[in-house]
Amino acid sequence: MNSNKGFFGGIPLIAKILVVSVIAILIVPGAMAIFPWVKYVIMGLIVFFIYENAAQAFGEKNILTFIVTGILAYFLVYKYLFLTSAIMMAYLFLGFGLVSVFFWGTSTLSRKGKK
């Protein structure tokens, strides 16, 4: 019997998926802490993301769009930037279906350990 089960050994698949997803989500806040210019890029992306969602809800040229964007940008970008960036990455992963890549990758790692 082979006792060498690879990197993720005897961990259940759902736990592997959660670990890989959390690591991938925390890469952006980690990069923001290490490289200052990444922080400004992420701030711009979050403000654009907030504006696009507010414009869809209230209309492109409505004053309420700019008020909601300003209020949300203050709290989400200036007060809670690291939390917001992690949540944004999780939302993007779910939106683009990149989590399925993690499913495939962790299942591939599991099969390599069974040989």
Image (cartoon, rainbow, N blue to C red):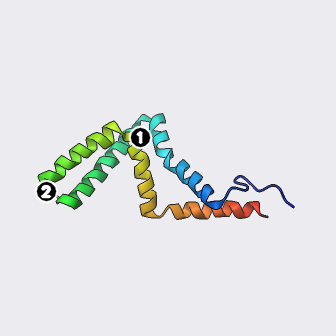
Tell me: 85 left or right of 51: right
Closer to viewer: mark 1 or mark 2: 1
Secondary structure beneath disc 2? loop
Q: Where is 42 relative to 90, above or below?
A: above
Q: Where is 6 relative to 71, above or below?
A: below
Query: Which residue is drawn at the image coordinates 70% and 61% (left, top)?
Result: 110
- Which amino acid type is marked by label 1? Phe
Q: How many angstroms separate mark 1 from mark 2 (CA)?
A: 30 Å
Residue 76 location, x and y as percent?
A: 32, 43
Pointer 2 local density, CA inside 10 Å: few below 14, some 14–19, many at least 20: few
Query: Which residue is drawn at the image coordinates 41% and 40% (left, top)?
Result: 82
Pointer 1 local density, CA inside 10 Å: few below 14, some 14–19, many at least 20: many
93 and 17: which is toward the camera: 17
Residue 24 location, x and y as percent?
A: 53, 50
Query: Which residue is drawn at the image coordinates 18% and 58% (left, top)?
Result: 58
- Which amino acid type is marked by label 2? Lys
Name the disc covering residue 61, or none: 2
Q: Where is 63 relative to 13, above or below?
A: above
Tell me: 19 left or right of 55: right
Query: Which residue is drawn at the image coordinates 84% and 59% (left, top)?
Result: 2
Tell me: 57 left or right of 33: left
Name the disc covering residue 95, or none: none
Quadrant in which the C terminus is drawn:
bottom right
Residue 99 location, x and y as percent?
A: 51, 61
Secondary structure beneath disc 1? helix
N-terminal of the two: label 1 or label 2?
2
Tell me: 51 left or right of 28: left
Which residue has dot 1 on it?
82
The extreme right residue here reads: 1
Where residue 108 sits, quadrant-wise, is bottom right
